[in-house]
Structure formats: C-alpha cells, structure tokens
Image (cartoon, coloured by chain):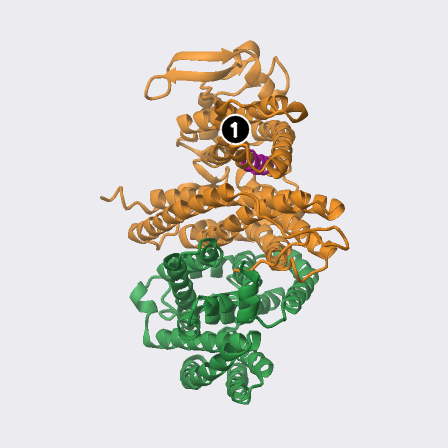
Chain colours: A green, B orange
C-alpha cells in the first residue's frame, strides 16, 4: 500500500478521534446555561468530563503534529491560510482549559460564573469554527502556485462553511448533552434527555442540509455511502435517546461524528487542499507529503503506539464509568 | 507604520513571548510531577500523613499550572504553520517526525495519566494510583526529549539531505536526529534545570511557612528535600550545561563567541571570561571589565591553552561560505542572557548550600531576612530558565535552521503584518491577564498550606486521601 494513502487515512482517523472525543466535551461545556441551574449542577456537568477533557484535547495536538510530519505542505497551507479562525480557536481552547482548573479554586460565585462563561464560549467557538474550517477544505479555497492561501477571512465565512459550522456546533452539542444523560442521574439525567431530543431534531435538519449540499458540490461514491451512514446513525441516536437508551444513543452519535468526518475526508481524497481558482495549484497526497522514509518511520511508530493509546484511554473511560450525582459532588465538598 | 507591521518582526515577537510563557509551565509540570511522585511513594511505603499532605499540597500547585502548560502548548504547535509556513514546508519532513513522536508516545500518555491521577484517588488501588503519577512524570520527561530533539535540529541540523528541486530538507536518518549531540546534552541540562525550578518552588513555599513558624511537620521535610534537590539538580545542570557548551562550540561557534562578545580570536590566558562588562553603546569597544583569565578557553575546549574563534573571524568565514550578510546574533542579548543564566543558576545552588548548613540537625534560623532571600528561589529559578532559552534561541539568529534557512525566509508569505499584530496583541493580553490570575492562585495555594487530613483508619493506622473534584 502506498504510504501516502495510509497516512491520509491515519490523519483522518486522528481528526475523527479528536471530533468524536473533544466534540462531546465541547457539548458538555455548551450545555452549562441550559442544564446548570445552580452551582452544584454546574459542578456535576464539569465533572462528567473532568478526568478526560485533557486526553480528548490531546488528539488535536497529535492530529496537528501528524499532519505536520506526514503532509508538511498541507499543514503549512492550512494553518497559514486559516490564520484568524485558528487564532480564535486557540484563544477559546486556552480560556476553556484553564477555566476547568481555575473555577473551583475560589468559593465566590462571581469568580465561578466568570469561568463558567469562559467554558461556554471556549467550547462553542471551536465547535463552530472547526466545522467552518473543514467545510472550506472540502470545498476548496483560492491558492497561488506556491500553495499559499490568497483569499481573505470573509471568503472563509461563505454560506456553505457557515452551515458546516452550525452543523458541527449542533452535533457536538447534542452529543455532549447525551453524554450528560449517560453520566448523571436523577433530574439532571432527565432534563438532559429531553434537551437532547429537542437539540437532536434541529441537528438532523442542519446535518442533512450540510451533507447534501457538500455531496452535490464535491461528493464521491464513498462520500455518499459514509454520509448515509452518518445520517442513519444520527436518526438512530435520536430515537435511542427518546427511548432512554443513553449508552446506545451516545454510541450512535459517536458513529455519526466519525462517519461524517470520514465522509469529508473521502470526498477530498486524493486531494488534501483543493484550489478553487486553479486545480493545478491544489495540494494532493502526492505533492503535499513527506518522503517515503519519513512515512515509513512514522508508520512503524503508529502501528505500535496507536493500539496502546486506544487501550489506555479506553481503560481511563472505564475507570471513570460511574455516574456523577449532586450527592457525590456535595459529599466531596467539605 | 510599515516597520510596525513587519510580519517577520511581529512573528518573532509572538514566538518569543508565547514560547517563554509556555516554558514557565513546562519545567513546573516536569518538576512537580516528579516531586509529587516522590512524596507519594514515601507515603505509599510509610503510610505517614505528612507525606500525603506534602503530596497534595504540591499536587494542588501542580494542577493550577498544568492546564496552562497544555493549552499554551497547542499554540506552540499551531504557530509553526500559522506564522512560519515557509519554515514548515522546508523542515516538515525532518522536524515533524519528532513532534509526531512526542504526541503519540509521550503527550497522550501524560495527558491520560494526569487525569487518572487527579481524579483517581478514591477509584484506583493505592499502588496503581501511585503508578499514574510516575507515568505522568515519565511522560512529561519523554515529551521534553522529543521537543528538544526537534529544537536541536534547528541548532545543529543532522540526519537530513537537501532536496533542491523541492526546496526542502528531507529526513534520511531518524536516529541521527534523535541522537544529535546537541539534544544529548540539552535534554539532561533542561530536565535538571526543570528540577531546579521545582526545587525553587518547594524552597520558596517552605520558607514562607517556616519564617512564620507554622506547618513545621510538613514544611521542614519539604525544605530539606527542596534544598538537597536544588544542590543535586544544580550540580547536574552545570555538568550538562558544560557538555552543551562544548557541543555548541563544535556546531555553532558563533553562538559561543556571541555569548562572550569576543570579537577577535583569543587563545590561552587571553581567552578570559568576563563577569561584567561596560562598553560603548554599540557594544564594540570595552570600557571596563572584570575578567577571569583562561576560563573561556576552559569552558570552550576543556583545556587552558585552547583558542576561541572571534565574531569577526567567523563573520569573514561565513561570508565566504554563504555570501554577504551579518551572521552574528544581537551581541548584548546573548552576552547578558548567558551571564544571567549562569549567575542565577549558581546563586541558587549557593543559597541552597547555605540553607542546608543553616538548617543542619533540625535548626531553624530566626532571622527574617534569611527566609526572605529563600522565598526568591522560585521566581528567580524561572527567570534563569527563561534567560537560558533567550540565549539559545537568540544566539541561533540570523538562522532559523542553522546554516540552512535564514529566519527572514521562514515567515508565512501570505500572512499580513496586521494579522500577526492582531494575534500578537490577543495572545499577549490573554497570557498577561491569565498570568495575574495564575500568580494569585499559586500564592493563595501556598499561603493556605498543606490540607488537613481525616483521622487514620483505626484498623490499618493509615491516612486515606479524599477524592478530588472540579
């Protein structure tokens, strides 16, 4: 197998891992104004992702580093081209990450509210902007002969991309709320289930519109198959949530995110950064990749390490499998 | 106005600010994870409540810091592509590999086990929980190795071939990159310096309480540990710093010449090391200087009759190799950064040695000023770390990859000065305000002192830890 093909899919897998995992914890962050009625509620919400948000976020670091190592041209074009949206994503991730640690350091409610707000905004901004970024990658952006982005920020905020951002925002929100219902008990679990039902129906509409629009402009056979899987899983997840099968609903929504992100990568392949102005300026797995030697080294590494990573991360989720309740929060606060 | 919006200058400032800021948290993560692991091991073996309280005390400070280390690290990885896309295209084939290795091998490991450690106190068996903090410490140290290997390629490119057609450096030998003589010295130098920072924090925190004659049961052993750790880590940092300067003389002689502001090649007794120099504003003429003869020769070659090439001779040599241009870094920056790094480092060791003498056999000095000096250990050890990085990175200029790619050719061509200015201002403001919150929280946590624990279990006689929650 051609190693550039393998690495295209490894990069896709790493972004899928990132969006499946950090996606739902963005959703938990965004759900605070809807589900957190008092401080204890908000603590319950934050503690559902407490032990795992950091490992979830690490996926973007690994995805970015792998992109850099395997496709330096893709990395350079993407990161310099989408400059200001990435600045916003970084600032949001900073605000969010420190807020988890800072919020419980002082008892004053004004202090806590400030960091709650930072968690909400810090979760919503990347949830939206990653969708904008990927919609633009799939659609293609203007590039010059040196593969440098020649458009403006406004070009990135086109209707298709805004719909993409809305879709990821809603999808992550729904996934996060389903996670809350899976990880809590009592009234919170019930409220989360109802909210997930309502958010899910809006998500279905937005996702269907985005997947069809993307398919009509850049769809391939594999895209349509994966997009169909995503759509079916989304509806199945919505139905499972209505029936109170939280674990199943969470799994179906994870499949939705994974299938949708894989679908976007499938529609790209073998291009990685199509140029909307002149196809000759675009990047493909051939002209964006590292040498065979580098990819060989990295392949051995990924082969041995990725299964190990999945194993110990899976174990972490198992260790923290217990539901978090108001009582468990109140008894831990002395 | 055009000067102000020069993307190159702004991108360099942004890299400098964000990197120095990030590297305040990295040594703390490395040093405090190891500290917590050591004290938790002591508690595991003896069951003594003091050790658990010390673990939780420094664990709290560690937690306040670690999230900052994580999120500011993402900025580091992203900005290569954002501000330095030409650099990324040029080195990605070589430089990306250690970064990806860091993520896959070390960072995933660290990020997962830190979560298990923080929230696992009441969920994991005691031995397994102890293993999670050691895993975090090992992960953070391995992470530093790969990052320093990537940085070493910028100082001393090895294991690559130039592909002129594609205009990039291509990896031909990953082992050469991972065993670069620069990383072999820089890695232990940086790790032991990180332990010095952690030791500085421990000394500062313990001194603050001991000066007030409080928390003696925990702060006395903590101080002893901090003082010994500072002396040991200080000695090892010096040994490997010496190895690093030998590697530097061999690979980047200009950096050593700039560290000493030596314009003409000097040998033997003339190869003296100046402790302090006053010069004319252009830095080229010396007005007053305190000098130690032979010391520069010894630092550069480990002999007393060695020669150290001067800036002027190296300039001439480099112009012949690479054409007209200025191949020297900003001399006053490298000169003073080098001195402050060494001076602060040695001062810390001296303070720790005196501290060990003053606290021998359980004594506690009564004079307040002694404790006041000790409290400065932490901020000044961070400062020593920062000037060390300023020296290493500014001393590499005008190159981004020494001898291969000038910094001015590395910047993103399509990113405007305004873009970089917006992000520079945004990051500086956010980092600045977070620093204020951060410092206040750390001081607050230190003043609060070690947490009280419940009564020991009547059956086992052990003190059991409480759960952690956000």
Residue B305 is drawn in which quadrant?
top right
User: Above or below — where is B150 with respect to A22?
Assistant: above
| Residue for point 57% across, 64% down | A331
Residue A234, how many percent across, how many down? 51, 84
User: Above or below — where is B30 with respect to B302?
Assistant: below
Residue B150 appearing in the image:
no
Task: Find out whether residue B174 is within the magenta segment.
Answer: no
- Residues A143 and A331: in front is A331
Residue A147, how many percent across, how many down? 41, 60
- Residues B320 and A171: in front is A171
Give the residue at mark 1.
B374
Quarter of the picture holding the N terminus of chain B: top left
- Residues A47 and B281: in front is A47
| Residue for point 29% across, 52% down | B418
B193 relative to A122 in the view: left or right:
right
Q: Main secondary structure of the magenta part?
A: helix
**Chain of the residue under label 1:** B
Dot 1, how many residues are within 10 Å of its Cα: few (below 14), some (14-19), or many (20+)? many
A278 relative to B469 in the view: left or right:
left
User: Above or below — where is B36 with respect to A79?
Assistant: above
Residue B425 appearing in the image:
yes
Range of residues picked out in magenta: B193-203
């Amino acid at each position: 197998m051609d190693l550039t093909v393998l690495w295209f899919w490894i990069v896709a897998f790493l972004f899928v891992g990132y969006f499946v995992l950090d996606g739902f914890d963005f959703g938990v962050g965004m759900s605070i104004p809807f589900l957190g009625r008092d401080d204890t509620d908000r603590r319950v919400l934050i503690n559902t992702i407490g032990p795992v948000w950091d490992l979830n976020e690490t996926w973007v670091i690994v995805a970015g580093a792998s992109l850099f190592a395997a496709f330096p041209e893709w990395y350079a074009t993407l990161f310099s081209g989408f400059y200001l949206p990435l600045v916003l994503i970084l600032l949001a991730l900073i605000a969010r990450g420190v807020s988890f640690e800072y919020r419980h350091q002082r008892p004053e409610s004004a202090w806590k509210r400030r960091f709650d707000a930072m968690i909400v905004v810090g979760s919503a901004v990347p949830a939206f902007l990653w969708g904008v970024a990927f919609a633009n990658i799939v659609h293609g952006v203007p590039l010059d002969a040196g593969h440098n982005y020649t458009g403006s920020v406004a070009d990135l905020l086109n209707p298709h991309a805004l719909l993409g951002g809305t879709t990821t925002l809603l999808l992550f929100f729904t996934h996060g709320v389903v996670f809350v219902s899976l990880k809590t008990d009592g009234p919170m679990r019930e409220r989360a289930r109802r909210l997930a039902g309502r958010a899910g129906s809006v998500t279905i509409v937005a996702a269907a519109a985005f997947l069809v629009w993307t398919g009509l402009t850049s769809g391939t056979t594999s895209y349509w198959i994966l997009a169909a899987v995503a759509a079916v899983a989304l509806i199945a997840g919505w139905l499972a949530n209505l029936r109170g099968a939280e674990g199943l609903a969470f799994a179906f929504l994870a499949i939705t995110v994974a299938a949708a992100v894989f679908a976007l990568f499938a529609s790209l392949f073998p291009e990685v950064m199509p140029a909307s102005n002149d196809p000759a300026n675009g990047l493909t797995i051939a002209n964006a990749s590292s040498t065979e030697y580098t990819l060989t080294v990295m392949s051995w590494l990924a082969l041995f390490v990725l299964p190990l990573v999945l194993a110990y991360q899976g174990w972490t989720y198992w260790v923290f499998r217990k539901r978090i309740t108001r009582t468990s929060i109140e008894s831990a606060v002395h | 106005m055009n000067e102000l919006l020069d993307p190159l200058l702004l991108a360099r400032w942004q890299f400098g600010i964000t990197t120095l800021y990030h590297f305040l948290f990295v040594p703390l993560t490395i040093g405090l994870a190891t500290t917590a692991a050591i004290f938790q091991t002591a508690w595991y073996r003896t069951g003594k409540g003091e050790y658990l309280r010390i673990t939780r005390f420094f664990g709290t400070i560690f937690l306040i810091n670690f999230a900052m280390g994580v999120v500011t690290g993402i900025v580091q990885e992203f900005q290569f592509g954002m501000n330095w896309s030409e650099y990324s295209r040029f080195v990605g084939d070589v430089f990306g590999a250690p970064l990806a290795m860091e993520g896959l091998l070390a960072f995933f490991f660290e990020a997962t086990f830190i979560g298990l450690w923080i929230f696992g106190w009441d969920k994991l068996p005691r031995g397994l929980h102890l293993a999670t903090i050691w895993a975090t410490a090992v992960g953070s140290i391995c992470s530093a190795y790969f990052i320093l290997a990537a940085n070493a390629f910028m100082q001393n490119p090895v294991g690559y071939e130039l592909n002129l057609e594609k205009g990039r450096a291509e990896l031909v030998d990953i082992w050469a990159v991972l065993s670069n003589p620069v990383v072999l010295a820089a890695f232990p130098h940086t790790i032991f310096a990180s332990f010095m920072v952690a030791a500085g924090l421990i000394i500062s925190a313990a001194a603050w309480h001991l000066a007030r004659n409080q928390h003696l049961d925990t702060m006395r052993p903590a101080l002893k540990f901090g003082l010994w750790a500072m002396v040991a880590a200080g000695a090892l940092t010096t040994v490997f710093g010496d190895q690093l300067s030998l590697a530097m003389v061999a690979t980047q002689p200009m950096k050593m010449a700039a560290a000493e502001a030596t314009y003409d090649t000097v040998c033997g007794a003339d190869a003296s090391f100046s402790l302090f120099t006053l010069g004319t504003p252009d830095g080229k003429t010396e007005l007053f200087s305190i000098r130690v003869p032979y010391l520069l020769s010894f630092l550069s070659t480990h002999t007393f009759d060695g020669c150290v090439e001067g800036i002027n001779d190296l300039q001439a040599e480099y112009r012949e190799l690479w054409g007209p241009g200025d191949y020297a870094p900003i001399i006053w920056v490298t000169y003073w950064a080098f001195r402050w790094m060494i001076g602060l480092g040695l001062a810390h060791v001296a303070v720790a040695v005196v501290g060990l003498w003053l606290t021998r056999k359980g004594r506690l000095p009564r004079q307040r000023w002694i404790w006041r000096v000790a409290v400065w250990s932490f901020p000044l050890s961070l400062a020593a770390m920062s000037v060390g990085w300023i020296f290493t990175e500014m001393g590499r200029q005008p190159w981004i990859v020494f001898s291969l790619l000038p910094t001015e050719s590395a910047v993103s061509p399509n990113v405007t000065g305004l873009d970089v200015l917006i992000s520079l201002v945004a990051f500086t403001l956010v980092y600045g305000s977070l620093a204020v919150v951060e410092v206040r929280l750390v001081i607050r946590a230190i003043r609060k002192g070690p947490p009280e624990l419940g009564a020991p279990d009547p059956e086992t006689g052990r003190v059991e830890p409480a759960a952690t929650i956000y």
